[in-house]
Image (spheres, grey):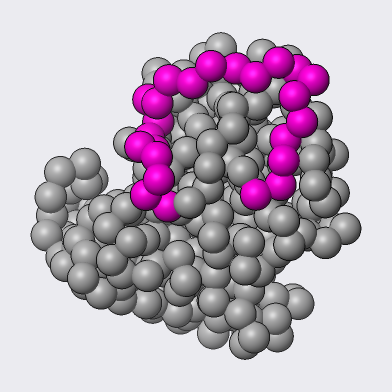
Amino acid sequence: MTSLSAHAVQTPATPGSVLVGATTATAPVPAAEPITAGQVVERVLPYGSKAHYFLYVPKSAGAHPPLFVTVHGISRNAKEHATLFAPFAEKYGVVVLAPHFPEPAYHDYQRLVHREGTQRADEVLNDLIDETGKLTGAQTDRFYLFGYSGGGQFTHRYAMLHPDRIRAYAVGAAGWYTFPDPKRSYPRGIKPGPAVPVGLHLNPQRFLAIPATVFVGERDVHPGTALRKTDKVNRQQGTSRFERGERWVEAMREAAKAQGVTGSFAFVKIPKCSHSFRRCMLKGDMGAAVFDHLFGADAGATHTQ
């Protein structure tokens, strides 16, 4: 696969070669400009959605490559996600899609809630995935999902609410979690309530069967800022991202056992970093760890469920 036609912004995919971030200003390329494999490109949906996305098609991609979706946190550094994951996508022949959910329209994208006048974030992602499939031939019926910080919240909730779409997923240092607790209402638990997105429901028999891995920096052990700190959440989940990730993994393991589901849940400590996506990628080798867990030699057996 060498080129595609699109509205795009082209960026070299070498980590560290450009300043990558959500606010980087770029000029649009004419519609006829081809998108060359091996470059990060920016696209918007044709119907004028407030959201847009960054796409990386590896030179190594086959006819129907796997799709890896990576979701930003509240810094909204979608371009950075696509750029830093691109070398690993090239190694494994995987298409990367990094959605960008801008403020204020998608202020609560992490919870998959509906805001007046705005399409729900999970529905937007579904549209982005459909378009990516048409552009690249990527496998979109079931895909691989990752999110960091606020994106980690989005990721595990999307997997819980759309289990038939996910082969496996990875959560990077989420601030707080939806626990598999039927006595607590969503988003703290899985009890049905007004916050559950319309038309969806939480089926533990389905979402507990999806392989999941949580990645947290070994120094991400402080309450910090931008962390939900209510008494109820602290009692249920702990006071740091590290503790909350460990507790959630254990709760998911216990719930899978209780449901008689063969679940696969792992907790991985990322060395040399606290709460920084960029540092975890560049100093802690998180990109290599995530792709190894999702696409490595030992991953296939757990992703066929």
* Whole-percent x, y for residue 166 in the image: 67, 60
Residue 206 lies in quadrant:
bottom right
Residue 196 lies in quadrant:
top right
Q: Is residue 267 magenta?
A: no
Residue 118 lies in quadrant:
top right
What stretch of residues is rendered in magenta? Answer: 15-38
Quarter of the image containing the C terminus? Answer: bottom right
- Residue at 64% from the left image edge and 86% from the top image edge: 297
- Number of marks in the rendered image: 0
- Residue at 70% from the left image edge and 81% from the top image edge: 300
Q: Is residue 33 magenta?
A: yes
Residue 235 visible in the displayed image? no
In the image, 235 versus 18, the foreground residue is 18
In the rendered view, tell whether residue 171 sits above or below residue 303.
above
In the rendered view, tell whether residue 155 sits above or below residue 255.
above
In the image, 195 versus 133, the foreground residue is 133
In the rendered view, tell whether residue 220 sits above or below residue 147.
below
- Residue at 37% from the left image edge and 49% from the top image edge: 16
* Whole-percent x, y for residue 288 in the image: 47, 71
Q: Main secondary structure of the magenta part?
A: loop
- Residue at 75% from the left image edge and 24% from the top image edge: 33
In the rendered view, tell whether residue 219 sits above or below residue 10.
below
* Whole-percent x, y for residue 149 in the image: 35, 50
* Whole-percent x, y for residue 2 in the image: 80, 47
